[in-house]
Amino acid sequence: MADAPSAVALQGTLASIVGENHVISDRDRLASYERDWTGRWEGRAGLAVRPASTDQVAAVMAACGAAGVDVVVQGGNTGLVGGATPMDDEIVLDTTRLDEVGEPDPASRQVTVGAGVTLEEVQTRARRDGLDFAVDLPARGQATIGGMVATNAGGALALRYGTTRSSVAGVEAVLPDGSVLSRLSGLLKDNAGYDLPSLLVGSEGTLAVLTRIRLALTRRPRRRAVALIGVDDLANASTLVATFRDGLGDALEAADFVDRQGLELVCARLHVRDPLPRPCGIYVVVQVADDEDPTARLAAVESEDWADVVAVGEDTQRCEALWAYRESVSEAVAAYDVPHKFDLSVPLSEVAPFADAARLAIEALDAEAKTVIYGHLGDGNLHVNVLGFRPADDRPARALAPLVAEHGGSISAEHGIGRQKRELLGSTRSAAEIDAMRAIKQALDPRGMLGRDRVLPAAPDPRDEQDEVRREGVSR
Ligand code: 2HG
Ligand code: ZN
C-alpha cells in the first residue's frame, strides 16, 4: 500500500519542529505503534512524531491542522480499547519524550511531570521522599501519566484514594488548533470559570494533547500487608469485601479478585503452584496499609473458618508474590489467546448476579468460549475477558453492554471507550449527555482531527433522519 500523501508531505515540516530523528516513517519502526500488546487492535500510522516539549507539541498540532492530517496520541501503548492505535494513516503523536520529572514540593505534596513519564518513575521519585502516587496498576512500567490522566485510570487503590482524577492538581495541554492551556499552579481552591483540567481528565485524547501534569501525592503509610483469601463464589466474595470495608475503614487499600479460571492461567504462565491448599472458586486479594502493624487489623476481621484458605504476606516480597496471582491475569490471558476485554462497573450487590448473567450470555454465543472474570471487587469493577472469538467479532461486547445497563452499571469503569465501545456508549449514557459531549468535541476540535472516531458514536446520517421523517409522513 502506498504511503498516505498528506502525512508523508508533512515529514519535512515535522522534522523541522522535532528534529529528523524524531519523525518516524520507517514501516518496521512504525509497527510497534500500530498494534496494541494484546493483538486485538491494529491499524496503520502515516508517521510517528516524538515532540520533546509543549511548544513542540503545539507546533506539531498546528502543522497537522494546517495540512488537514489526523492525529492520535500514544504514550506507553498499554490501553485496552483501541483508543491509541492509529487508523487510516493517522500521525501518531508519541508523548514519551515529554519525560521531565520535577522536584516534589513537600508543603503542597505536589509534583509536576511530563505526560510521557511512566507511573513507575513517578512512584519511585515520590517514594524517595516518603510520599506516593495514589494510583497503581499492573502496567506501571510502561503506562504513562499522560495516558492515565487521559483515561482517568483506576487501578486497585481507587477504593481508598479514588481514580486518577483525584490525584490531578492541574494540567498543561495543547488544543487541536495548537493553542496551549496551562493550569499548573496546583491551587487547591481555584474556581475561576469552567474547570478545563477536569474536562480533559478522561477525555481519552480526543479534546487535547496533555503535555504536563501537576500531580497531588499522598503520604505513604509505613507498613502494609496482603491477604489472599479463597471463597466459593462471587456472592461470598462480595460479602467478605463488605465486611472488610466495614471493619478496616481507610486502612483497606485494595480488594481485588480473580476467578479460578484466571488463577489457573496465571499458575501455568508463571509456573507457580496454587496459592492455597485447596482450589476455590474465587480468590480475593486484600491489601491493608497503616503506620502501625496492619496484620493486627487484618486479624481483627479474620474468621476462624478461613484457616485453610488464606495466605498472608507482610514483607514486600511476599506481598508482591501474592499480588502476582491477580496482577498477572491480563498477561496470562493474552498468552493463551487474543482476548476480548470488557471493563465495567456495577454496584457491589450486583457483582455476583451480573457475573452469572455474563457467563450465560457468552455461553449462548459460543458454548466453547472461555470466560475469565477478575478485577477490583471493592469498587464493583469487573474485567470480563472472553477467549475464543476472532479479534474483529463484536458479539461479546454487544451481548455484555445491555446486561451492564440492566444491572445498573457503566460500560467503562476504568479503561475508557476508545474504538471498542463507541457504538455502545448509548447503553449507559443518555442522548442528552451524548449531545453535550458532541458539542464540546465540536467546540474544541471542529475538524475532528484528534482521536477521530473514538469515544463518541458515529453521528447519525442526516439522510437516514430525512428518510425516517418521510416514512413517518407516509404512515400517518
Ligand atoms: C487490571 O486490573 C487491568 O489488571 C487490566 O485493568 C484488565 O486486562 C484487563 O482486562
Ligand atoms: Zn483493572
Image (cartoon, rainbow, N blue to C red):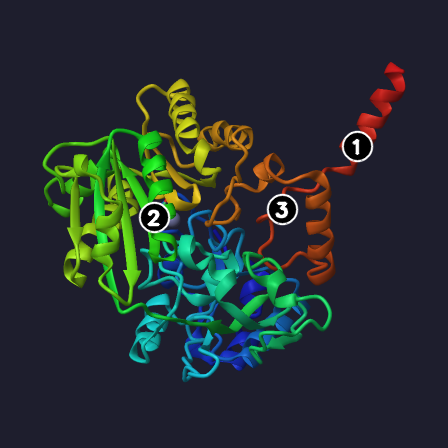
Q: As displayed, is residue 283 above or below residue 66?
A: above
- The C terminus appears in which quarter of the rendering? top right
Tell me where residue 95 appears, x and y as whole percent. Answer: 46, 69
At label 1, counting other C-alpha atoms closer than 10 Å, the crowd grade (few under 14, some 14-19, many 20 or more) is: few
| Residue for badge 1 | 465
At x 29% / y 29%, what residue is drawn? 233
Disc 2 within 8 angstroms of ligand 2 (CB): no
| Residue for badge 2 | 247
Nearer to us of marks 3 and 1 is 3
* Amino acid type indicated by mark 1: Glu
At x 56% / y 72%, what residue is drawn? 171
| Residue for badge 3 | 456
Q: As displayed, is residue 82 above or below residue 308?
A: below
Q: As displayed, is residue 150 above or below residue 370?
A: below
Nearer to us of marks 2 and 1 is 2
At label 2, counting other C-alpha atoms closer than 10 Å, the crowd grade (few under 14, some 14-19, many 20 or more) is: some
